[in-house]
Amino acid sequence: MMMMTTDTQPSTAWPAEASTAQLVSQLSEQVSTLVRDELALARVEMVEKGKRAGVGAGLLGGAGVLAMYGVGALLVTIGAALAMVWPVWLAALVVTVGVFVVAAVTALIGKKQVQQAGPPAPTAAVDSAKRDVDAVKSAIRDGRHG
């Protein structure tokens, strides 16, 4: 894997003809570019995971709000059910169970979103960096035996 340099003058020397200083300079430039690219990849990955975790946290917050409405519905139902044919406890129980079921479903969806965000580490950038290190090691090994 050969990377282009950012010099304004293209290098005319082949690696076999290049001086050690030129090779070290090229290596330094390529490593610097590689590190910048890997950091950019890590940043993009972290932003994406942050957005997904934010959606999941919002859904979990929504589930909390619905649970609070469940408590309110329980109190209102108790008062309204006094005038109904059903026993008070049964009417209140039906409404309360319905609200808590909605809250549970919302919480499960939110939990799934948070889990899909994955670990906070930039795994794609780490994997890419490992492949780069392996490629450099392989090139060094092949250069010694070639």
Image: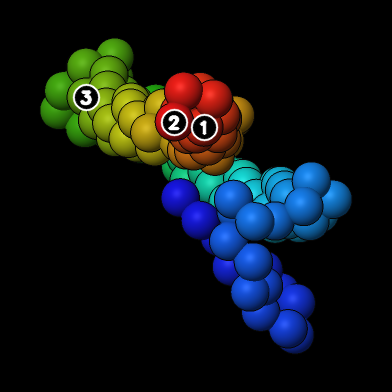
Query: Marks 3 and 1, Cα distance to the nearest angstrom?
Result: 76 Å
| Residue under the point 54% across and 47% down | 45
Is 24 drawn above or below residue 72 in the view shown?
below
**Residue pointed to by mark 3:** 94
SS at circle 3: helix
Residue 39 at what x, y percent from top left?
69, 48
User: In front of the other: label 3 or label 1?
Assistant: 1
Residue 73 at what x, y percent from top left?
42, 35
How crowded pointer 3 is (Cα within 10 Å; few <14, some 14-19, many 20+) is rated as few
Query: Marks 1 and 2, Cα distance to the nearest angstrom?
Result: 5 Å
**Residue pointed to by mark 2:** 146
* Disc 1 to disc 2: CB gap under 8 Å: yes
The kind of residue on which mark 3 rests is Val
Residue 115 at what x, y percent from top left?
41, 27
Q: Nearer the viewer, residue 39 or 93?
A: 39
Is there any visible trace of residue 107 in the rendered image? no
**Residue pointed to by mark 1:** 143
Horizontal relation, residue 114 to residue 98: left or right: right
The kind of residue on which mark 2 rests is Gly
Q: Nearer the viewer, residue 46 or 82?
A: 46
